[in-house]
Every structure is written in C-alpha cells, then in structure tokens.
Image (cartoon, rainbow, N blue to C red):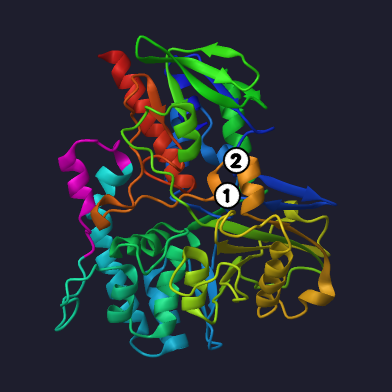
Amino acid sequence: MAAAARLAVAGHRVAVYERGATHGGAVGRCEREGFSFDTGPGLLHLPAVYRDLFVKTGKEPLERCVELVQVDPASSHLFADGTAVTLPNASRAGVLRALDEAIGAGAGERWSELVNRARDAWEATRRPLLEEPLREDAAAREALGRDPYPAVRRRGLFRRGGAVTLASVAARELSDPRLVALLESHALAYGLDPRRVPASAAVLPYMEQTFGSWYVRGGMRALADALHDRCAARRVEFHFGAEVVGLAEKEGRAAGLELADGQVVEADLVVAGVSPGRLASIAPTALAEIPVPVLPGRCTVHLALRGARPGGTAHRTVVHGPDREAELDAVFGGSGGSAQGAYRPTVTVLRPDDPATRPDAGHEAVTLVATVAPHGRVDWSGEVAGAFADRMTDAARAVIPDLRERLLWREVRTPADTEAATGAEGGGVPAPALAGAGGAFLRPGNTTRVPGLYLAGGFAHPGGGLAHAGMSGAMVAGLIVAGARQ
C-alpha cells in the first residue's frame, strides 16, 4: 500500500491484488465481545517514514489521520533473577540512571557506550541500507557485507578469528547477564539469533532509544486502515480474495498477473510483496537465486480481562526467559535443542491504555507475544499451541499477579495461523536487513531480472518491520518514477 499510494500520486493507475479478505497483510485485528487486539506489530518505530508517506500522498498529514502516542516508559523488563527495570522513552540520560539504579553503578555507562558504538554503525550504513535501493553490483554488496559495528578490541578478544556476533559483543562489552539479556531481547523480538547475527544488530536498540516507540490509538491496525483510506482517496483499486499464482510476461517483460481463478490481468508494471517461496512459484526467474529461509514466527495470546487496567502500568513489559540457551535452541535450532521442548519463553506483555481496545473502563485487553520456531519445525496446528500458550500466560503472571482471577477468555494465534493468513512459509516474520556477516542478513533488492517486476515489503530490501516496509514502498515508487522519466 505504501508503494501504491505513492505511485497513484505520481499519475499511475494502480490496482492491488490481495489473497486475503482485507487489506494490511499481517497488520491485522482480532475483535470479540467489545475487545480489540492487534494481531501484528504492537508498536511503531521511526514514525517519520509514515509521516513522509502521508505528506507526499495527500493534503492531510499522518497526525490528522491517526492519533500517534509516544509510549512512556518505553518498556519495563523483568529479568530471570527477579531484577526489574523501567526504561524511559527516548531519554539516554534517563536510561542510564534507570540501569544504574536497578543493576548497579556503571551499568548505565556500559550500556551507553555500546549504544554510542551502535550509533556509529547506524551512521555508516543508514543511507545505503535504509534510504537507497539495494544495488546488485558486487562492490555494493561487499560494502554492506562488512560489519560496521566498531567492536572494542581488548586483549584476547576474538583472537581466534571467529565472527563478531551480537552475543560476543554483549558478553565482552556488557558482561552483566541482565544487560546481555536486555541487548539480546531486541534481536530475539525481531526473530534474530544473537549467537549468529552480526554485531550491527546493536542498531535495533539504538533506533528505539533514539527515535522512540509510538502507539496508534485504536491499535496499529488503525495505521493500516488510514493507509488504505489514503490509497482509496487516490483511486487505487483493491481486489480481495484474489490470489496471484503467476506472472504474465511479454517479450521478456512483466506484463500482468495470473490469478488462481484463471483470470489474467494485464499491467505495464508489477510490484510484488510476497514471501520468497511465493515469489519462486510466481516468478521463478525473478532473481538469480531465490533462497527460501526458514524464519521464526510469533505466538500471540490475546487475553480479555475483567477489572480496570491499574494506573501506572507500562505499555510494554518484557518478561525474560530463565534459560537462554534452551530458548534460542528451540527457536533457531542448535545442538541438543528441541523446538517442542517445555522451555519458558521470553514474553512481551502489551497493555495499551486505550479505550478502543476494551468494552469499558472495567476491563482490560492484554496481548502476549513470543518469538517461536516456524510452523513445520513445530506442528503449531496441534496440541503444542495450547501448552505453549499456558507457559506464556504463566510467565505473564509475574507482572499480572491476579491474571487467573481476572481472565475471561483468551485467543491463541500461532505461526500456522500466520501462514494461512499471509502465505509466508512457516508463518515466518522477516527481520530488518542488517549489514555484516558477508551480506547474509540482507534481503533481495527491489529490482529483479525480469524488467518491469519490482519487489517491496518485509521480504525485500530493506527488510521487515512497519518502518522498513514503508521504506521499501518509497524505494520502489522512486525507481518506477525515475525509470519513467528516462
């Protein structure tokens, strides 16, 4: 939709073909008995991406279409040893004080120094990684394949020539297991294994701490609704329940779409926002190689609670798991790891102070989220889902002690549900693109080997997340408009 709105303003006639019954993809909503829950992202980072989109596509800016609220505190964390810390939003000095008070003198400074180095990594790669289409030439990919994080080289550090990962940096530069858990939780939330991801993943907490965390009144689905309305106002056509199964080509160029019902839709240009497996099926020659990675998914538990939301409750609380290795092995695979093991996951508890999410002030809507192994490696359509949701709910009781007494009902959504709704293999959720690791954490570029076929969305450059998806739409629209001028 981000690409569609921009292209419509540029004078193109645009039609969106969506296999689902509504717009928004994974940015969905669950409604029941007066309660409302986001089924996708719960918070927005880098809201400037959508401010720019709405300014460039119409007279009404973003804040006139949705109510953006800066979440403060940004998050609370409950660590495995019982230590609790609450971190303010977009306040570096406040974060430093909070960590010193909760963990001990010097903790805030160690965290601050790491974030400073993450800022250097951000500045080094922000433009080529987030603001420009990914060039396919070898030099460009080689440059982004180098990790920009300036890891501290102390005596003996990495002397064996091993990869500098987020985990190795955390262990050496933070040392305290609670600070390590804090850093690694940002990677885990995006479906990234801190033991394998490059140190440049430290930009994830840097972005959040620097630019803040934001919530949209009515839930994040309200953002998808506002963008759909903007597209409709620009006369973008929407066709739902229209599954694309093939790319029509003419003289070696993209010439339209083939739909599951046999219909062929003609087009001059095609923008695909699909998973790698779907792309391989629809347009097998689009890329020189279309890797289909097995990405982690999300297990989400929606809780309808009787009783008012207590005053002073944090919007987001992360309850850290007690066994790091067991959890990482279960989610990402590892020696001796079992994806179906009875480990207790790291759980993010979302408790928005939003009347639109509950029937009245005497009730509360709570969402629990955990990163999990994809459907296929775990059969999420079976009994595993209920047992895992029980463990997530038990974890949430650490911050909602009266949860059992207040619980009216719950709904569980797993990677199997995500796969059914979006078509993504295993219900996998793409992470933002990262520099380093020889380019292993980059996404396919926005152009393809088939002229007239472009890629957008979380499975294309610059990767997953609401902000990054919006960036990909801007990049694709820019490429098309620039090409039309040549």
Please provide percent x and percent y for residue 270.
45, 21
Is 20 covered by the magenta stretch? no
Please provide percent x and percent y for residue 224.
59, 39
Assign a secondary structure to mark 1: helix
Q: Horizontally, is 111 left or right of 281 in the view?
A: left
Using the image, determine if residue 184 lies above or below residue 200.
below
Using the image, determine if residue 449 lies above or below residue 313.
above
How packed mark 1 is, by other alpha carbons closer than 10 Å (few <14, some 14-19, many 20 or more), is many
Assign a secondary structure to mark 2: helix
User: Would you name the residue on which mark 2 appears?
Assistant: 422
For the residue pair 387 and 370, the one nearer the viewer reads as 387
Please provide percent x and percent y for residue 181.
44, 77
| Highlighted range, magenta | 131-149
Residue 427 circle label: 1
How packed mark 2 is, by other alpha carbons closer than 10 Å (few <14, some 14-19, many 20 or more), is some
Q: Horizontally, is 426 left or right of 291 in the view?
A: right
**Quarter of the image containing the C terminus?**
top left
Residue 295 circle label: none
Please report the residue visible at 38 percent of the width from the left and 38 percent of the height from the top: 290
